[in-house]
Image (cartoon, rainbow, N blue to C red):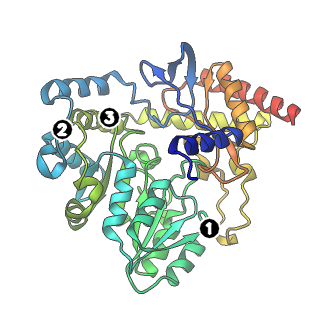
Amino acid sequence: MTPSLGAHLARELAALEGRQRYRHRHAVTGVHGVRIKIGGRRCINFCSNDYLGLAADPGVAEAMAAAARQTGSGSGASQLISGHNRAHAELEEQLADYLGRPRALLFATGFAANVGIIDALMGKADTIVADALNHASLIDGARLSGAAKRVYAHADSAAADAQLAEAGSGHRLLVTDSVFSMDGDLAPLPALMAAAARRDAWTMVDDAHGFGVLGGGRGACAAPSRSPESRVPSPDVYVATLGKSVGAAGAFVAGDEALIEYLIQRARTLIFSTAPPPAVAAAASAGLRRLQADQWRRDHLFDLIARFRRGCEQLGIVLDDSIRDLAHASPETRNPKPETFLTPIQPLVLGSDADALAASRALLERGYLVSAIRPPTVPEGTARLRVTLTAAHDAEQVDGLLTALADCVRRAETVA
């Protein structure tokens, strides 16, 4: 006899609980900044993607409030009906100008952008070549498109080139994150773009965690002035989000005129979704202006990243890049250089789900919110604490977290 849906789901949830895989949400009271309040407890937030500290910026909030007073709380329709507001159009123009691309197009979320774009561009006769650690939205977009999928070993450009060479006769799309959200490392973009050019493949880069932080703010694809030979050609499709460094919500794709017009006609996640509220676009515009003007935010953030990594080394805390298994990568494409990991995402791999959960809870008891990341978000046996730093943190907070982390790691080693 088939169990009821409720009975079936109850067993599934119990199984998750037994495997230390049950997820719980924290209800934050007030502003989502560095100092937050959860269940009456005040703590320092070290797991936010608000890399430049703009999500709690009063100026960005006031821009949203002022726009809401003028345009209301919602858009009322999809972009192709009546939901496209002048605030949306101005933000798209601002983004295109900042990135030096002909056009930009807004989506409600980064997930919607990636799924909609890949599904619109690729079909059953085509092949998608993707990094093994790509974000779930890129994976789901590839699945939905029906295209053949070839996955290459993480950050291995030689393996990507081989997969492109073996792809079928249809269109080929090389898809990668720029900064990988659970590891904090960078894709070898120059080598990947070169491989795609050799194989006549299209390119798509999801720069969600690089935009606003890397390349002077213009992201991981911006040409590094100190290293002309490592300049990254502009990908055909550039995607980034507005809910991380920009401090608002939503996402966008930037590219040429034909790409944007085609997506307006064919991207189902855009066509069949209500447009984001104009007030959110106004907030993103304000955040983008601050992002451009406030270089000190990036300077301070990178100082804190270096301080955190230096402190971990002094305390014997082993960060992920120090224990990464690089045996899968070909020697010429292994990239364990320290600067590869100078991103706001600093994971501490603890291995078991139980250890990661125990460490996260111990940190919260000491006033630090650091989430435990467990499978299937990360591979089996690599449950971790994912520390993220922001420009709104200060040196004292980072030092306090380091002390607390050292205590938690020693406690876990003693129990083990």
Q: Which residue carries the number 2 mark?
A: 75
Which mark identifies residue 153? 1
Of callouts 1 and 2, which one flags the residue occurring earlier in the amino acid sequence?
A: 2
Which mark identifies residue 287? 3
Judge the density around disc 2: few (<14), some (14-19), many (≥20) Cα neighbours within 10 Å: some
Residue at mark 1 to residue at mark 3: CA–CA distance: 36 Å
Between 7 and 356, the one nearer to me in the picture: 7
Give the image quarter of residue 163. bottom right
Between 202 and 294, the one nearer to me in the picture: 202
In the rendered image, is residue 206 in sight? yes
Which residue type does callout 2 highlight? Answer: Ser
Asked if residue 4 lies left or right of residue 341, the reply is: left
Judge the density around disc 1: few (<14), some (14-19), many (≥20) Cα neighbours within 10 Å: some
Residue at mark 1 to residue at mark 2: CA–CA distance: 42 Å
Circles 1, 3 touching at the beta carbon (< 8 Å):
no
Which residue type does callout 3 highlight? Answer: Gly
**Picture residue at 38% right of the left edge, 77% below the top:** 124
Q: Position of residue 270 (x, y in %)?
A: 26, 53
Of callouts 3 and 2, which one flags the residue occurring earlier in the amino acid sequence?
A: 2
Outermost residue on the top side: it is 40
Q: Position of residue 228 (x, y in %)?
A: 47, 63
Q: Position of residue 326 (x, y in %)?
A: 71, 62
Between 353 and 15, the one nearer to me in the picture: 15
Give the image quarter of residue 356. top right
Residue at mark 3 to residue at mark 2: CA–CA distance: 20 Å
Asked if residue 267 lies left or right of residue 194, the reply is: left
Give the image quarter of residue 122. bottom left
Query: Relative to residue 194, is residue 63 depicted above or below?
Result: above
Circles 1, 2 touching at the beta carbon (< 8 Å):
no
Secondary structure under badge 2?
Answer: loop
Query: Relative to residue 247, is residue 120 depicted above or below?
Result: below
